[in-house]
Amino acid sequence: PKPFDEMVAALEETAKDMRGVKPGGAVVHWFKTDLRTNDNRALAMAADKAANAGVPLICLYIISPEDWEAHLRAPVRVDLILRTLKVLQDDLAKLNIPLWIETVDKRKNVRSTVHTFMESWNANHLFANMEYEVDELRRETALVRECASKGKSMTVIHDTCVVPPGRLTSSSSGRPYAVYTPWFKTWKQHIHDNEDLVDLVDTPAKQADDLKAKVSKLFGCAIPESPKNKQLTKDEKTRFAKLWPAGEHEAVRRLQQFCDDRINGYSRNRDFPAQDATSSLSPYLACGAISARTMIQTAFDRTGAKALDRGTDGFKVWVSEVAWRDFYRHVLAGWPYVCMNKPFKAVYSNIEWSYNKEHFTAWCEGRTGYPIVDAAMRQLREQGWMHNRCRMIVASFLAKDLLIDWRMGEKFFMENLVDGDFSSNNGGWGFSASVGVDPQPYFRIFNPTRQSERFDPDGVYIRHYVPELAKVFEEGASAIHEPYAKEAAKARKAGYPEPLVPHKDAREKALAAYKKGLGK
Ligand code: FAD
């Protein structure tokens, strides 16, 4: 059985036993990727349970250095998580609720650590929001069963998606959707039919002083420094703290500002990387400082939309982008092997990828000789973030122009993105390399130069991130999109690299490799 179905089964099996569980001495909420107090479903349930039982609510966060290995969480993301924990701890303290942070030596010890704390706090009720990655589902399923066998209750609930996985199936096949467009139609309908889906849950009320007193030793728990392999330089720390201030207040501020100033122009401007036209909320969603429901509801309220289909073009398109995030989580729950380095369709396993180290390093370092690709890869390095249009351009370039295994690009993104999110990243790479669920057809190959001319017409984005080109090409100079084809002497003088591969030839090679792999 799929890990997601196993989890659902474990919750159903244990539901009856959980009803009779006594309050014990405390209720515990286990924070994972839901680092906020607003609209946090499991936290709200835990707070209600604790208040009704008259026992304190204690919050727990567990750090396992293995989960913070670079290929799972980039240093910049770890840094944001740690800073977010500090804000969360302060916010919770104002509500008289402690946040205990524990570091375990090995990931496999997370479960036993949860049990140890439950015992030592004499807690019988544990709450957590569900994560849909295979390892997390398996771990939490085991915990649900273990808690039940100890006479305790663990409640794991849907929170991270607007519409939880498992709810939408195709009316013709009865199976989950593997194509976005019909899925999106059903997603919108489902929200309208179930109005409580976007109903935001309350922030926990302030815990009574006598309950606070019972857990007074748990306040002010130290937040560890970044793990050794994750040390950022002082300069990077300062830069990232300025770019990505931590916490839910910052996320809400960004959201409101986006909805007031930019959302209505989103459909027109979102593809131009030199413009500040998108919400830049992805890092906050990735650590759970904001919920996707809050995003949809706030956009709805502040733009005066009448329905998901009845609002400004900007509102409608933005909602459709937030929905992509839900879609990829549904895919992960329905086809868990996508998280095991496998393409969505087995037939795509036969494409012969290149593992050319020199080309890959040049791509990583932003030295491919294609200015838009290089600007984007340097933006990733500088900000830990990259514009969506550019993510598509660089992913297509790696997989199609260089024919390098898309999984190497997927991993590099996770190692460097502040918003690294397994399902959206996997989905984005699958789409761009034409190997994923609902991919773009393999014969549609981005021409990086045309993309650059179209989406960065005056070269503003390129000039910002590739200063050597900015020195020799003024704003608006068309040669900046293909310097060696138009002004080779200037490009050479500037020390800018020559293109790694000519796009025309690379395109032919890619078409041949895909056709061969697909047996066409
Ligand atoms: P906005 O344009 O303001 O959109 C609002 C929100 O909608 C985003 O924050 C995000 O949660 C969601 N969203 C928007 N576009 C997409 C999309 N194409 N797929 C899924 N969700 C989307 N997004 C991540 O959050 N983490 C990743 O690791 C990630 N890796 C990607 C890799 C590739 C190859 C590609 C093509 C896309 C990837 N994306 C990823 C999706 C997208 O690029 C980012 O979500 C977006 O650029 C974030 O900027 P924003 O918050 O300003 O987005």
Image: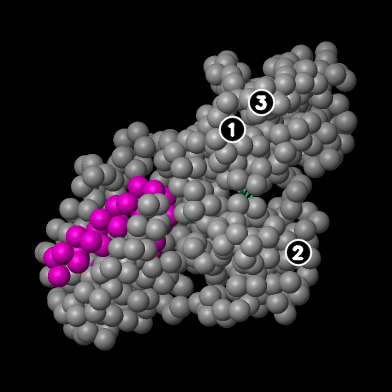
Q: Which residues are magenta?
A: 126-151
Badge 1 local density, few (<14 within 10 Å), some, or many (20+)? few
- Front-lying residue, 458 or 415: 415
Residue 519, which numbered label? 3
Tell me which corner region of the image, top left, top right, bottom left or bottom right, holds residue 150.
Answer: bottom left
Badge 2 local density, few (<14 within 10 Å), some, or many (20+)? many
Residue 475 x %, y %: 84, 36
Q: Nearer the viewer, mark 3 or mark 2?
A: 3
Name which residue type carries label 2: Gly
Residue drawn at 64 percent across, 62 percent down: 172
Residue 281 x %, y %: 57, 57
- Pointer 1 with pointer 2, Cβ within 8 A: no
Name which residue type carries label 3: Gly
Badge 3 local density, few (<14 within 10 Å), some, or many (20+)? few
> Secondary structure beneath disc 1?
helix
Q: Is residue 232 visible?
A: no
- Pointer 1 with pointer 3, Cβ within 8 A: yes
Q: Which residue is mark 2?
A: 314
Give how far apart the Cα atoms at labels 3 and 2 are: 42 Å
Residue 505 x %, y %: 78, 17
> Secondary structure beneath disc 3?
loop
Q: Quadrant of the C terminus?
A: top right
Give how far apart the Cα atoms at labels 1 and 2 are: 37 Å
Residue 347, which numbered label? 1
